[in-house]
Each structure stands twice: as C-alpha cells, then as structure tokens.
Image: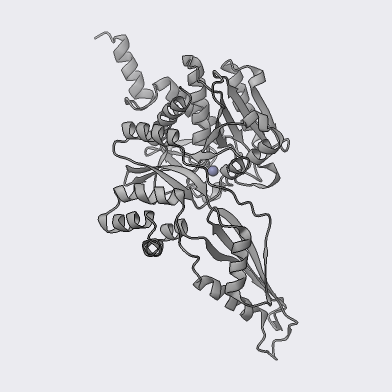
Amino acid sequence: MKPTLSTLALWACFATALCSAALPPPEYQKLAHDIYKQLIEINTSFSTGATTPAAEAVAALLRSEGFPASDIQVLGAAAHKMNVVVRYHGGGQRKPLLLLAHLDVVEAKPSDWSLDPFKLTEKDGFFYGRGTIDDKAQAAIWLANLIRYKREGFRPDRDLIVALTADEEGGGPYNGAAWLVKNHRDLIDAEFALNEGGWGDMLNGKPSANNLQVSEKYVATYRFEVKNKGGHSSLPVPDNAIYRLAEALIRISKYKFPAQTNEVTKAYLEQMAKVSPESTAGLMRAAAQGSAKAIEQLADSSTALNATLRTTCVATMLDGGHAMNALPQTAGATVNCRVLPGAKPEEVLATLKRIVADAQVSITPSGEIVSGPASPLRSDLMKAASRITDTMWSGVPVVPVMVMGATDGLYLRNAGIPTYGIQGLFVEVNDFRAHGRDERLGIQQFYEGEAFLYELVKALATP
Ligand SMILES: [Zn+2]
C-alpha cells in the first residue's frame, strides 16, 4: 500500500516523538528536545563550568529564528557568567510577563554517576543528565514555546520576556536574577514572573498534584561559638567549651518553633484535603480554618508538614579543639534555619538566644540573610493553571505551595515582581533527583510540561 501523507505523518510521529492530543506537535517536541540536549551538554556548573557558552548558544538560535538582535541581550556579572534575555513583543495592553529559568547547574562528578552527567541520555523512559530537572527542562521549554509562538504568528497582548540566568545554585556575586534586577531592571520588568520551584507530584507514575509555588522559606545561617582559656587535658575543669556548645545544641534540638499557617499554607491545606485520606483530610480542613491544635498535630505528623508549618533550625557543622591533649579553647557549630516568610531574622536570632540561655555561647549570623515576602495568590493564574491541569491530568488539583528551598524568586519578589513557580513537570515524590546522582526526568513528563506551559503562557497573554 502506498503510504498517504497522513499515515506518513503518523509513522513519523511514532518514530520520532511521543504522540497524544495533549502533547506538542512532533516538530516542537523535537525542537524542545534539541535545545534541552544542547543545554545539558554544556557544563554550566558553578566552579567547573560557565553559563556564557549556553547563553551564546541560545542567542544564536534565537537570531536564526528571526528574533531581532536588538531584542536579544547577552549580559551578566562576569565574562563567564552571562545571562540571556529575549523579548517577544506583544500588543502592550498589559505589563510584560517574565519567564525565568536558570542556566547553571549543581556540580556533578562524572565518577559519582552511572552515566555521563553532561550528555543527554535517553534510557528506560527517562532523560538523564545534570540539569534535566533543575532547571534546563524549563529553560528549553520556554525557548521552544517562544519560537513556536513566533512561527505560529501568535500575538500576545503583552510582551513575553524569557530570561535564562547564571548561578542560581552558586549564588553570590554572579547570580543572574539578582544582577538583572539591580543593573537592568528595564529588561526584565514585568507584572509577574513564572519560574521553577513548582514541580508536579507523581505517586507510582500517577500525577497527584500540580504545585504552584507562591512563596519560599528563606535561609538564615548562624555561627554558634564558645571560647575558653583551655589548659592541659590532664587537669580537666567543669567549664569546657565543647560541653558548653553541646548543651546549647541539645537545647536547640529540643525546641520547636510555633506551628502556624499563612495565606499560602492555608490554601495548600484546603487543596490537599481534597486528595488526602479522611483521617488527615479532617485535620487539614481544621488547620486551614485556624485551629491551633490541628496545626500543631499536623506539624507533628510528618517531616514535610513540620517544615511547612514551622520555622526550623538544625545543626549542620561542628568544629572545636586544637590538640588531643589540650582542653578546647574554641568550639563552634553552624546552625541552619529555614524561616517562614513573614518572620524576621531578628526574631529568629532572639529566639535562639533565649533557648540557649547562655551568654558564653555567642550566636551570630553567618553571611547575609535575605528574607522576602510571599507573592499574592493570583486568581487569573490559579484559574488558568487549574483549567489546563484538569484538561491534561483529569482530577489533579493545582496546589499553592511554599517551598523549603530558595530560588531566584526571592530576588524578584523583593524587587516587587511577584513570582510563581509552576512547571507542569511531574516527578515521583519519592525519587526526586535534582542536585543528586543520575538526575532524570520522564520523557513523557518533559513533553507534557512543554504542552502545559505552552497553553498556560498563552492563556496569560491573551485578553
Ligand atoms: Zn533550580
């Protein structure tokens, strides 16, 4: 039989890409795949890599797609730490929408991995490589979708800006989001931004919640230190720097910051109550309505809920002493806190001092503490995300979340650009490999995320 055009198209579809009504057309799956591969195969880690080759590759691709050179900027804090920003012009009826992702990745030692971290490998239904989840999938998808809008002649009612940035993971002076906010606000100024940080949760291959990250806990790290005159270890005295520090740390380990809810965690509990077993669902509803008892009970019921409902502080590093036969003159520890947005760093410090209750244990912040506000819940975003999620993954709720880690959303929120983490990329909750060994993302999930973000951005840029 002579193949017709449509059977050929179908065959090409099976041979080269996944096909489904919910997935992007094969040519755009291929486009996203090729950009993803190119980005993964450029080492952009903090110390052994650079973001500039990736930023330049993106700029070259955009120019080849006919984006005017004047709408593409490659710039940044250092020659090897460039960001790339591209603007796709819309009707200008509303302020722009910023689509953010970071180009850099956490270090990956090839000897620790079972495959080459800087090569995109397809195996057993997954894409493997450093950055497959964090954050090169979203970077590739923003680009593929922007190119698709342009090829399709889609005219948004507002400018769409894609910013792919340096050193989200490394932070410090090269952080692209912070640098752009400070030095080129005009290039990225937007009504609001979409970013990483809102993964979809999957349980045994089945999507259970599409997370929308609205706020983040912020990080506050403290140095605990005890000084002592020391002496010979053959003549011990009761006042010992190591023991004193140890007692302070034990007190911190036993202390629980009060459990509480905010606008975001309330909405989270309401949504999660809909998909949780009745025993937990009842507690979640009561907590969302403000029952202090239910909030405490929930916080005590799991590590994740504890971290969601409380500020937490934990000892992470220790040092002390200078010789095996000398009484210690110094003992020190690092205590790392994850603070609920809204709580002030001074309050956390005051609490630590009160709990330790020992003037000889000095407690001082290590490094700069950047706290930030939550983004207000936006009904347009919630509605669009919920509608598209329900079409693609029937019955899966969009759940507003506060995350425990920190992303570049912090810098944007502090600059008055509300930022929301949403990706439509579903990952097994018990096998999340971002920052870890053999990082991977499901192939199907990658293309579904591409389709989801295509529709979401379109909905947010159409009157
Ligand atoms: Zn990330």
Along the viewing direction, whichever of 34 and 214 lies nearer the viewer:
214
Residue 294: where, in percent of width, then height?
A: 36, 62
Q: Is residue 79 above or below residue 274?
A: above
* Image spot of residue 454 (x, y percent): 44, 27
In the figure, is residue 242 to the left or right of 442? right
Q: Residue furthest bottom?
A: 235
Query: Taking 231 as reference, is 442 left or right?
Result: left
Asked whether 36 or 268 is in front, the reply is 268
In this picture, is 378 found above or below 92? below
Which corner quadrant of the figure contains ligand 1? top right
Q: Quadrant of residue 412?
A: top right
Identified at 57% across, 73% down, the residue is 355
Q: Residue at x 33, y 32 (%)?
A: 392
Q: What is the quadrant of the N terminus in the image?
A: top left
The image quarter in which residue 283 lies: bottom left
The residue shown at (64%, 47%) is 171
